[in-house]
Amino acid sequence: MDSRITVTHVRVRGFHLDGYGHVNHARYLEFLEEGRWAFVDAHPEFAKSLAAGVALVAVNLNIDYRRAAVMHDDLEVRTCLSRLGGRSGTVGHEIVHRDSGEAVVTASLTFVLLDQRSHEVIALDGEWRERLAPLVTALDSTREPH
Amino acid sequence: MDSRITVTHVRVRGFHLDGYGHVNHARYLEFLEEGRWAFVDAHPEFAKSLAAGVALVAVNLNIDYRRAAVMHDDLEVRTCLSRLGGRSGTVGHEIVHRDSGEAVVTASLTFVLLDQRSHEVIALDGEWRERLAPLVTALDSTREPH
Amino acid sequence: MDSRITVTHVRVRGFHLDGYGHVNHARYLEFLEEGRWAFVDAHPEFAKSLAAGVALVAVNLNIDYRRAAVMHDDLEVRTCLSRLGGRSGTVGHEIVHRDSGEAVVTASLTFVLLDQRSHEVIALDGEWRERLAPLVTALDSTREPH
Amino acid sequence: MDSRITVTHVRVRGFHLDGYGHVNHARYLEFLEEGRWAFVDAHPEFAKSLAAGVALVAVNLNIDYRRAAVMHDDLEVRTCLSRLGGRSGTVGHEIVHRDSGEAVVTASLTFVLLDQRSHEVIALDGEWRERLAPLVTALDSTREPH
């Protein structure tokens, strides 16, 4: 797989479920956040900036729930940087069943980077563009019609 | 306020926050789910159908994070049925600061109704349309440009 | 009821449940934390101290799960200060079904107060004792054998 | 390490934290539940029984919070069966910092096994005793005074 896509795994446990026996729709956001932190871990320069007082702040999330996940399912969370704009970027996410490859969730999270001292949104130019532009790619699912 | 809009309240507590001291973005989905259950409570016929084996299943959520909420904030969650299609409907949500009225979150959740015995999506016609069509309305924020 | 006991209410929702259709055992800790914050809200001097840089830090929790709670249950969370020691105190908690009065959960949480600047545990004497000692009381359930 | 002790790992993420920047006390219960499911995964006969309609139901949890965990900490969750009684058993848990080995949390969870059809507590004799008795062991921390 494209090295710009970070892959993490999660096995569905009892505390992830809701009363229907399906993973609760809010829990997927934790799986996605896990994916983003793993992405940061995989890109040490990005991690260094966050540690130095830059916060990644969500401004929009658009999430498709495509198939239910249930107890004991092994899920794969795929995360990449899918768009880089002037003041915001987008993270692409996909959660699939590891065995079947079927999509459970696809999502796009639009974010800004915030300077935690000045509380100003950081423009994604200069050093930031040099750092992030080479990471932009697409997940398969974002190319499929659905 | 329009009687078709259900209003619930939540005070932000320590366990709602993330490491930045802001309400974690996944927690808002629990506030919204709380809003939907309160909406169901306010419409007994709807509640009766759900109790009889109809599940409301989320298929898409589109959520704008517009302003951070912090410890001790009093939030108001507004929930309504904003669209009724042939096989799916949309719930409109808005979370505002009670004191200032400023929007914290706006969201649209698209759902289907699932017959839990047959696992078939229920068409929103006949009795269901008679029951739900009179409830369709809009939140102020969904009329505003943003 | 004893005015030193703070009462809050929660209705069980889908996101509180686990795969068995019961409130997940971890969720009760959020209900208890809600109870403690409501207790703080009800005692403004205590709230003022916390706002000024004192953290209430849990050191032990002992919780009995006595009866399952399920979807739509209306629960009452009762919270009080049940013990005041030299360097730690204990909060007593009880969660009951509102209709039947039956106990769902009983719990004791032992805490220290931490000065967030010095990171030192605050001795519960002098002003703190004057403030807290009059609040010490017991929940019915903590007097019952069980 | 003793093969009867199941070890799982978790890295602390933003959504695990509370407003103090520490792992929220309720989140540890999810880490412990994760440890129990991993223990079940590691003992297929146990997993088979649970799949066939036996529920592990918590009746008491006693948890010591010994040291705060913060963002990016790598934690190790150790889980074993520490006691087997006539009608209940106890699971021992320990969460330590992987680098320092320092204890973050120690906990004991007392459970019963429930037949989900009859809703009766299962006596831990006969086949169940043969299956579970060889698994009983102790974590280091449960031998230490603290």
Image: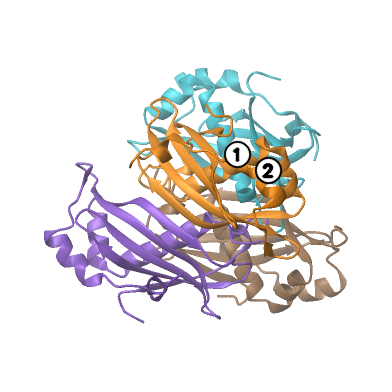
Chain colours: A purple, B orange, C cyan, D brown
Please, what secondary structure does the residue beneath circle 2 have?
helix
Chain bearing mark 2: B
Other residues around mark 2 within 10 Å, as few (<14) / some (14–19) / many (≥20): some
B72 lies left or right of A81: right
B123 lies left or right of D88: left
Give amino acid for label 1: Leu
Measured as percent of width and height from the top left, residue C81 is found at 60, 28
Q: From this view, report whether residue C65 is shown above or below residue A132.
A: above
Q: Residue at x 61, y 77 (%)?
A: D3
User: Quick one: which residue is furthest to the left in this view?
Assistant: A126
* CA–CA distance in space, label 1 to label 2: 8 Å
Q: Which residue is mark 1?
A: B135
Q: Residue at x 84, y 75 (%)?
A: D127
C34 lies left or right of B22: right
Please, what secondary structure does the residue beneath circle 1 have?
helix
Measured as percent of width and height from the top left, residue D134 is found at 73, 75
Task: Using the rendered view, name the quadrant where residue C117 is placed.
Answer: top left
Chain bearing mark 1: B
Quarter of the figure with the N terminus of chain C: top right
B12 lies left or right of D48: left
Measured as percent of width and height from the top left, residue D58 is found at 71, 54
Other residues around mark 1 within 10 Å, as few (<14) / some (14–19) / many (≥20): some
User: Can residue C55 be seen at all in this image of the molecule?
Assistant: no
Q: Which residue is mark 2?
A: B131
Residue sitting nearer the eye, D127 or B43: B43
Measured as percent of width and height from the top left, residue D25 is found at 52, 47
Q: Are the residues flagged by discs 1 and 2 from a single subunit?
A: yes
Question: Could you tell me if the residues under marks 1 and 2 are in contact, i.e. CB atoms within 8 Å?
Answer: yes
